[in-house]
Image (cartoon, rainbow, N blue to C red):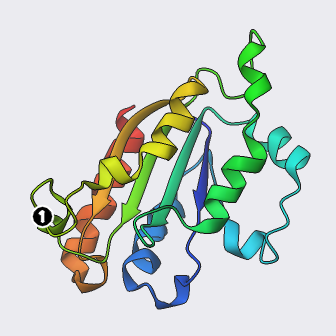
Amino acid sequence: MKKTLVLFAHPYYEYSTANIELIKVYGDMAELDFKDLYEEFPDFHIPTFRERKRIRQYERLIFHFPLIWFSLPPLLKLWIDEVFDMTWNAEVNHPLQNKDAFIVVTVGGKEENYLEGGMYGTTVSDLLKSLTLSLKVNNIEVKNIIEVYKADDLDKTELLEFSEKIKKNLKDS
């Protein structure tokens, strides 16, 4: 498995039964470092240069978070704003080049609400455009987006299926 950094961002993690269960999948994986952004940066002060140095060590980034008001959690958005550096694109071998990424997003609503003709008139993929575009312009290939709908209504069996899907995605690429 590629050396991987999980960037987990959930401002109300202790109330998320789905995420409490899903992040267990990362615990037994070698070559994987798990960072809870809300635990690491509770004051929203991100040491930019330390984070830029840290991400150089990894071949893969996993962004794991809940959809909050149709967007990324604020601290994850701030982390990207602070850490990604547009001047890197001018460098031949910049720190993000040739990395890949996975996105695991939990959604409280039903999947049918997130269809073009659904209640919200848009898809989760469309709502994640700012993230996927930020990755693309930095030459990070998004391998897969795992969308977990009705997250807090899932039973243990359903959560186990999503955990296995995460494991399989990480091991297959």
Q: Quadrant of residue 84?
A: top right
Is 53 above or below relative to 112?
above
User: Looking at the picture, which amino acid does disc 1 mark?
Assistant: Gly
**Residue 28 pos. (x, y %):** 52, 60
**Residue 151 pos. (x, y %):** 29, 76
Residue at the spot x=67%, y=48% of the render?
80
Residue 83 or residue 30, whichever sits in front: 83
Tell me if 44 is positioned left or right of 25 in this view.
right
Q: Is residue 125 visible?
A: yes
Residue at the spot x=31%, y=83% of the render?
152
**Residue 50 pos. (x, y %):** 89, 48
**Residue 4 pos. (x, y %):** 60, 43
Q: Is residue 1 visible?
A: no
Residue at the spot x=35%, y=35% of the render?
172
Residue at the spot x=43%, y=84% of the render?
16
SS category of the residue bearing label 1:
loop
Tell me if 143 is positioned left or right of 50 in this view.
left
Residue 54 or residue 45, whichever sits in front: 45
Residue 95 or residue 44, whichever sits in front: 44
Mark 1 crowd level (few <14, some 14–19, many ≥20, 10 Å Cα): few
| Residue lying furthest bottom | 15
Query: For the image shown, how many numbered marks are present on the structure?
Result: 1
Is 77 above or below relative to 52?
below
| Residue lying furthest top | 92
Q: Quadrant of the C terminus?
A: top left
Residue 52 or residue 131, whichever sits in front: 131
Q: Which residue lies under the disc numbered 1?
A: 118
